[in-house]
Image: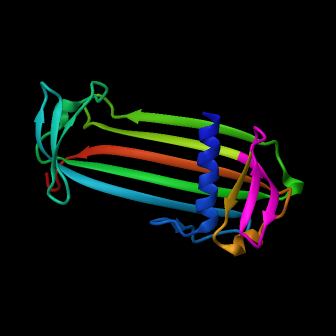
Amino acid sequence: MKKLIAVLSMLSLVLVLSCQSMGMKQSAVMKPEEIKKESVVKVTATVIAVDLQNRIVTLKGENGNIVDVIVGDDVKNLSQVKAGDQLVVSYKEAVSVKILKSSDAVPLSQNVSSDVKTAELGQKPAGTVTEKATITAVITAIDASNSTVTLKGPSGNLVTVKVNDPANIQMVKVGDEVVITYTQALAISIEAPKGK
């Protein structure tokens, strides 16, 4: 688990420092010591049929493709879903990197949290799952000619990451710490057709 978190965090750092990831936009307000990026993907499908006995929902996608989805017992309120309802799925991914100068250093650490929320009884089925990982690492080496930065995580592991935007390398020095926060959220909801 720790290894996965470290890999995800370091990957996130690469994405943030490169500022060139597909579909991601850099925050309009950026301080030299903080970089933020996020992406959001939203997909909508129309409910064609609901088989409550077998817990199968037939969906028609935005491009006309039709698919049957088996709905697990953990989904409450399936009986509230009707043909014509809209299934809306949103996926958000955000990365924040804050640079702490060596005078502001804090102990190296990592923290993972998750949160699951579901619809209240009697409402249309809905839910969100949010996962957040935060890791603090220290910069142990900078190679400006190759645009790389080497980070040491809380477990002592060293990871070298490529920085695609050389201007970002100028913002840091050996001994600085980076606090990387990676958040992903998946939200699924059923909405009544518009006009009803």
Callout count: 0
Q: Relative to residue 16, is residue 44 drawn left or right?
A: left
Query: Up-down: is 148 above or below 135?
Result: below
Find out whether residue 151 is within the magenta segment: yes
Query: Up-down: is 25 above or below 126?
Result: below
At which x and y percent is residue 192? 19, 47
At which x and y percent is residue 25? 51, 68
Q: Relative to residue 1, is residue 157 drawn left or right?
A: right
User: Residue extending furthest front?
Assistant: 146
Q: Relative to residue 101, is residue 61 drawn left or right?
A: left
Q: Relative to residue 23, is residue 150 drawn left or right?
A: right
Give me the residue at 26% from left, 35% from top. Answer: 123
Report the front residue among 121 and 1: 1
Give me the residue at 12% from left, 48% from top. Answer: 84
Give the extent of the magenta segment: 136-157
Report the front residue among 82 and 139: 139
Q: Quadrant of the N terminus?
A: top right
At which x and y percent is residue 47? 15, 45
At which x and y percent is residue 194? 17, 55
- Looking at the picture, the colour scheme in use is rainbow
User: Residue extending furthest right?
Assistant: 103
Which image quarter: residue 3? Answer: top right
Find out whether residue 114 is within the magenta segment: no
Give me the residue at 62% from left, 49% from top. Answer: 9
